[in-house]
Image: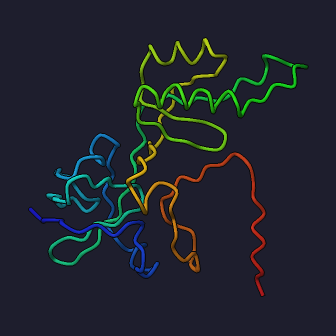
Amino acid sequence: MLQVSKLIPQGQGLATVLLRRAATVTLDWDVRQKSRFDAESSEGRRVGVFLPRGTVVRGGDVLVTQDGSLLRVVAAPQAVLKITACTDHHHGHDHDTAFDLMRAAYHLGNRHVPIELRPDHLKIEPDHVLAEMLRSMHLTVTDVREPFEPEGGAYAAGHGGGHGHDHGHSHDHGHGHAHGHDHPHAHAHE
């Protein structure tokens, strides 16, 4: 079995062509929050991963095997609850749907639930008690199968939102930036 003991967050510093060519390993959140696990690559090779304790593996990270080959991590779609603000409730009350989501995030955070924060929705692992609580707060809760990338606590520097790397290359790495609206990035293509 191939050993992996090195992780390159988001493949920083690696040439895009290498990342594109790399085999992938698809892992759900349960596995990605462990520092030791076995997995199988897209080429069918078994790998044994031994990372420093407390390491959280994110979609888009790159694992380096002992023989120097690269494995790009793909966050597996899994059953999650997607929480969105309900728009058809308080019409005419100048109601702020962003505030509803903020309040939901606060109540979930109080319960120490792993939570993925997005500008227009939240995601948590399935939990019917929490789903009921959120619905009672006038939020829409739907069952979906999507990658789950919860916030990494304040100590997880360099992950979560901290993508401080150079985007001078094609955007084909696995950050699920599925914002339901378009940002016209003014890239001057000469």
| In this rendering, position of residue 116 left or right of residue 19 | right
**Which quarter of the picture shows residue 126?**
top left
State which quarter of the image contains the N terminus.
Answer: bottom left
Q: Could you tell me residue 53's position as x and y percent?
A: 20, 54
Q: Which color mode does the image show?
A: rainbow
Tag count: 0
Q: Residue, x 77% and y 24% (percent of image)?
A: 87
Q: Residue, x 30% and y 48% (percent of image)?
A: 32
Q: Could you tell me residue 26's position as x and y percent?
A: 33, 52
Tell me if residue 40 can be seen: yes
Q: Is residue 77 above or below residue 22?
A: above
Q: Could you tell me residue 189's position as x and y percent?
A: 76, 82
Q: Residue, x 47% and y 31% (percent of image)?
A: 109
| In this rendering, position of residue 102 left or right of residue 27 | right
Q: Is residue 68 above or below residue 157?
A: below
Q: Residue, x 59% and y 43% (percent of image)?
A: 118
Q: Is residue 85 above or below residue 4?
A: above
Tell me if residue 46 can be seen: no
**Which quarter of the picture shows residue 68?**
bottom left
Q: Is residue 129 above or below residue 49?
A: above
